[in-house]
Amino acid sequence: MELLKSALPGVGMKYQLETKAGSNFIIVHHEDGRREIYCSDPEDNENLIFIAELEDEECMLLSSVIGGWNE
């Protein structure tokens, strides 16, 4: 499991995580603060499926749920 980080000039940063199970998640953090979450299509790894656009408060809530801090 590795978190890959790359710059998207004029857009922001891209973070990519491939899970042990083979799922691929991509988060684009735009320069204006927006964050978009994508996953790769299981049938075509080059095709991305848009999941959601999150604001700061939503990101914090989601991270607390995933991290188990919101139980």
Image (cartoon, rainbow, N blue to C red):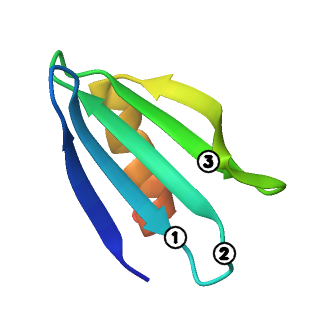
**Residue at the image point whose x is 40% and y is 57% from the top:** 16
Give the residue type at disc 3: Cys
Q: Which residue lies most toward the right here?
A: 43
Which residue shows up at 56% across the image and 40% down it?
Answer: 38
Q: Name the residue tied to disc 2.
A: 22
Q: Name the residue under label 3.
A: 39
71 sits left or right of 23 in the view: left
Measure the alpha-carbon separation of dots 1 and 2.
6 Å
* Mark 2, other Cα within 10 Å: few <14 / some 14–19 / many ≥20: few
Q: Which of 7 and 68 is in front in this view?
A: 7
Residue at (49%, 61%) from the top-left corner? 66
The quadrant of the image that shows the N terminus is: bottom left
66 relative to 60, above or below: below
Give the distance between the C-alpha atoms of the residues marked 3 and 1, in whole angstroms.
Answer: 10 Å
Mark 2: which amino acid? Gly
Label 3 element class: strand
- Name which of mark 3 and mark 2 comes first in the sequence: 2
Picture residue at 39% right of the left edge, 52% below the top: 63
Q: Where is residue 26 in the image (x, y as percent from the top left)?
A: 46, 48
Q: Where is residue 42 in the image (x, y as percent from the top left)?
A: 79, 57
Task: Give the class, few, some or many, for how many residues have Cα within 10 Å of label 3's Cα (few <14, many ≥20).
Answer: some
Which residue has dot 1 on it? 18
- Kindly state the secondary structure of the residue where label 1 is placed: strand
